């Protein structure tokens, strides 16, 4: 077990910068997720920790020791690749034993450790088979057994579940998270799947374009997205993000949308004429009676998913995603009125895209209404 410190790491491939001054501290025993869209630099960062890539600048520390100049096999990390990278000619047993033999582990120890690792991931019955005689899920388990058999200080996993079908992925997600909690081995897992990140991670590092956007627990990332990128990346459907301007009217100040008006608490520190981006999650919008809504529009799309219903409400050129539990309560093309609690309405700076706050908290003396738009 060990803490990992990634300190100011940048990486260039030729003249292209793919990591920009990345700093992340991963605690001993923590499961840290690197999450971001394709090409954002997640794999490159993981490979840099593993020693498969050199950092152009910055340092990597494992348990307080700078490892930049250590070869991968001397860093005491075990990596699981998306492809699993099993040796096709070796039996499952020999695949799992491989790292032990490579490290010249005494023969009498090998058998016990291979069997213990195989047992942990439930593949004892396949030990004599070759990888080609296994399903994708079984191969994935072998790759994990091969990683845990060495008892490394750190696990590095690159999209380990992405080759599995949806049902197996859900099952393996839970199994791996449970295994990691039992072993308490510091783990960095790369994924572009936000559900994987939210359900498995102790914390999530959200990346985009080689830059860290936010580091936090799943709840922090969801409840308090640092900027519009994170707000739009986490959540399905993603947060509605709509341009607005702070305006003053006779009846008070508010956020003017293309076709709506969100009253601001009198104590709101948002300056009049300031351009902002309003964010409301689809699950926080609710249908209210006429006259009580912040937004009015016609129902453009209804998707009934069984346990919940997704809808799109079109309002003056803006499409609002809406999500409600259970069956649909609206009809296609019907005019509906939407509202949300002030604590669920986010304001982001229109220029920097950074979070300013929610309308409930954008009050210096904390006296803001919790619900607006009545
Ligand atoms: P994905 O989810 O698609 O695997 P990623 O976030 O893991 O994406 P990386 O594989 O780290 O992204 O790639 C980051 C950027 O670096 C990409 O633009 C990629 O094309 C580039 N890149 C990666 N490896 C190399 C290389 N060896 N030489 C040049 N460019 C590279």
Image: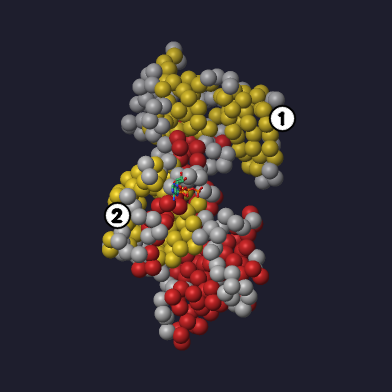
Left of 165 or right of it: where is 367? left
**Label 1: few (<14), some (14–19) or many (≥20) C-alpha neighbours in 10 Å:** some
User: Can residue 138 be spotted in the picture?
Assistant: yes
Residue 261, given in percent of the width and then of the height, sits at: 50, 21
Q: How has the structure been colored for display?
A: secondary structure
* Eye-nearest disc, 2 or 1: 2
Q: What element does badge 2 sit on?
A: strand
Name the mark on residue 59: 2
Name the mark on residue 331: 1
Quarter-wise, where is residue 346 in the image? top left
- Residue visible at 44% across and 75% down in the picture: 102
User: In the orientation shown, which residue stands out farthest toward the top?
Assistant: 250
- Residue visible at 37% across and 41% down in the picture: 15
Q: Earlier in the sequence, mark 2 or mark 1?
A: 2
* Tally of marks: 2
Real-space Cα separation, disc 2 to disc 1, in angstroms: 57 Å
Against 71, is 295 above or below? above
- Residue visible at 42% across and 51% down in the picture: 44
Q: What element does badge 1 sit on?
A: loop
User: Can residue 253 be spotted in the picture?
Assistant: no
Residue 35, given in percent of the width and then of the height, sits at: 47, 48
Left of 148 or right of it: where is 293? right
User: In the orientation shown, which residue stands out farthest toward the bottom?
Assistant: 108
Residue 275, given in percent of the width and then of the height, sits at: 41, 22
Residue 265, given in percent of the width and then of the height, sits at: 41, 26
Q: Nearer the viewer, residue 222 or 31?
A: 31
Left of 171 or right of it: where is 41? left
Q: Nearer the viewer, residue 102 or 184?
A: 102
Q: Nearer the viewer, residue 93 or 89?
A: 89
């Amino acid at each position: 077990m060990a803490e990992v410190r990634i300190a100011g790491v940048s990486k260039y491939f030729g003249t292209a910068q793919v990591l920009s001054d990345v700093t992340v501290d991963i605690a001993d025993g923590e499961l840290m997720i690197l999450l971001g869209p394709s090409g954002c630099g997640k794999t490159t960062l993981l490979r840099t920790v593993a020693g498969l890539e050199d950092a152009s600048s910055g340092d990597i520390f494992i348990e307080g020791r700078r490892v930049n100049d250590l070869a991968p096999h001397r860093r005491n990390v075990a990596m699981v690749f998306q492809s699993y990278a099993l040796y096709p000619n070796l039996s499952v047993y020999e695949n799992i034993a491989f790292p032990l033999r490579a490290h010249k582990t005494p023969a009498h120890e090998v058998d016990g450790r291979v069997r213990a690792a195989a047992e942990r991931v439930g593949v004892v019955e396949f030990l004599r088979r070759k990888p080609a005689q296994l399903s994708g899920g079984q191969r994935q388990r072998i790759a994990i057994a091969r990683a845990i058999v060495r008892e490394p200080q750190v696990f590095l996993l690159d999209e380990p579940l992405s080759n599995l079908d949806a049902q197996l992925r859900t099952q393996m997600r839970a199994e791996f998270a449970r295994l990691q909690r039992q072993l308490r081995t510091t783990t960095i897992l790369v994924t572009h799947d936000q559900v994987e990140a939210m359900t498995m991670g102790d914390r999530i590092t959200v990346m985009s374009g080689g830059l860290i956007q936010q580091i936090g627990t799943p709840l922090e990332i969801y409840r308090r997205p640092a900027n519009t990128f994170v707000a739009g990346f986490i959540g399905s459907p993603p947060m509605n993000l709509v341009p607005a301007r702070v305006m003053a009217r006779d009846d008070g100040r508010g956020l003017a949308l293309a076709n709506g008006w969100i009253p601001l608490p009198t104590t709101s520190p948002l300056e009049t004429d300031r351009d902002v981006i309003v964010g409301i999650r689809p699950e926080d919008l609710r249908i209210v009676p006429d006259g009580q809504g912040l937004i009015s529009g016609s129902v453009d799309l209804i998707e009934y998913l069984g346990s919940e219903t997704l809808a799109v409400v079109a309002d003056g050129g803006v499409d609002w995603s809406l999500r409600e539990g259970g069956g649909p309560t609206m009809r296609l093309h019907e005019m509906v009125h939407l509202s949300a609690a002030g604590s669920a309405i986010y304001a982001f700076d229109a220029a920097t895209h950074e979070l300013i706050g929610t309308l409930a908290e954008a009050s210096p003396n904390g006296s803001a209404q919790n619900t607006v738009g009545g």
